[in-house]
Amino acid sequence: MVPSARQIFETPASAEQIRAFQAWEQRNTARMLLRYAEFPDTSAFGLRPSDVVTIDRAMRFDFTGHEPRLFDANGTYVGTLTNAPVDLLQSFVAALDGKRSIAAICSEQPFAPHAASLHALVEALLGRPFLIRASLDELESQLRAVELLRFPSQSPYAMPRQYWENSIAVRQALDDFYSGANDFDAFGKGLRGLHRLATLGANGQNYYGGAGGAATVPGELRNMPISNRFSPRKKWIFDRWLRLLDFPSVLLESGSIVSTHGVPLARIADHGSGCHHAYGRAGEQLAIQLNELRVHLAAACAAVEADRDHLLRHCALFHHAFAHAHPFGNINNSIAMNVVNDLLGRAGIGVIPHLYFDQVAYFLQPEDYMRLFERGVEAHVMNDEVGRDRRATAALLEAVASAPPPSA
């Protein structure tokens, strides 16, 4: 029997479920690594047999040569599709009528003997030139892609479909999660439930994992210290972002990050390139940090309909505490940002792209991060009034594109 979303949210994963998920994660490490790319240049979305595939009208194929060639709307050459027979691909493109699924088309002649290779070709080129608009529209109607990406201008095809679908399941469970914000045990159970939904999906089999070097355990808190390291290039981007926001403080390069309630959160070392998150001998350090983020979540929930400034403050402190607690081995910020954007949306403020909020949080004391968050919301928030093409967001994107290479 396929479990329900509520069962996934409420029930710890079995040993069999965990083993199956971790075996999948290990097989798909290379695919999951795409999550860490700032500008993924390949499609990670995935193609399913039920998808209806069409051709992007801004692209065109040239079938006059020995191999199909692809051009954009300006006539600029994009690339050649090697190992794709011209006659077969030309017939296949003509068969994409916008009504039948790819499975239905590939079940016919002359495509049936080549179904696997055609499926792989379309999957690799989703977003350019192949589109599955109906599938994206269905997801977009439930949760906008811009709420899940670092930059709202990125293609949704650059993220795994499971990430999007599982984020929808997380959003649907947030009322239950918020209801436990005033009790530590209920909060902890709810947080683990959100992680199961984020990793296993609403049906327990829609896997989305990590590639951080340690196997993900769906719904289980980390049992070891965590260290995050950042290259000089990434620190350069952080500094540029702070300047774009006219933020007066600088990122910490050495010392301890301490919460507004005096809870030690992390230690910064190596000239600001390393952030070390403690665990405690038996998880007691992590437990204290989890309670810190619970307190800020409860305060944020209470302020949604009453106090915008109070809401922003506690959304910031919640996100800051979440980044430092790093509750799970993998798949953390997606949960935190789903919560933050849900609360901002409920308050009528809008939503923010992920940008580098989670990473910059590592190197700022909570009060400083709160001020950065407030400036960031002002500069980058997306709503019906300001739209999604914010000047500050574009400026940050330009800075990322001009950042020194990793070896610099």
Image (cartoon, helix red, strand yellow):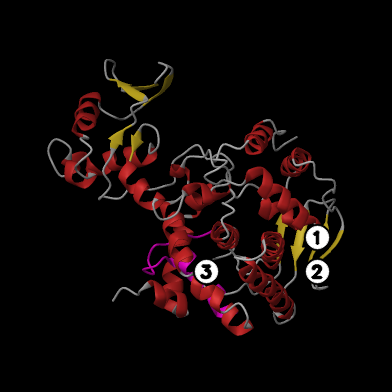
Going 36% across and 47% down the picture, which residue do you hit? 137
From the viewer's side, name the closer residue of 295 and 128. Answer: 295
Q: Amino acid at mark 1?
A: Glu
Sort mark 2 into few (<14), some (14-19) or many (20+) by Cα contacts within 10 Å: few
On the picture, is 133 further left or further right than 361? left
Q: Are marks 2 and 1 in contact (CB under 8 Å)?
A: yes
**Residue beneath disc 2:** 260
**Residue beneath disc 3:** 195
**Residue beneath disc 1:** 367
Sequence-wise, the earlier of marks 1 and 3 is 3
- In the image, is residue 209 part of the stretch drawn in magenta? yes
On the picture, is 191 further left or further right than 399? left
Sort mark 3 into few (<14), some (14-19) or many (20+) by Cα contacts within 10 Å: many
Classify the position of the C terminus by image quarter.
top right
Classify the position of the N terminus by image quarter.
bottom left
Q: In the structure shown, which secondary structural element does the residue marked by tag 1 occupy?
A: helix
Q: Amino acid at mark 2?
A: Thr
Instruction: Quote the CA–CA distance across marks 3 and 2.
Output: 26 Å
In the rendered image, the residue lying farthest to the left is 109
Confirm whether residue 22 shows in the render.
no
| Rendered location of residue 331, percent (x, y) | 56, 62
| Relative to 195, residue 396 above or below | above
Sort mark 1 into few (<14), some (14-19) or many (20+) by Cα contacts within 10 Å: some
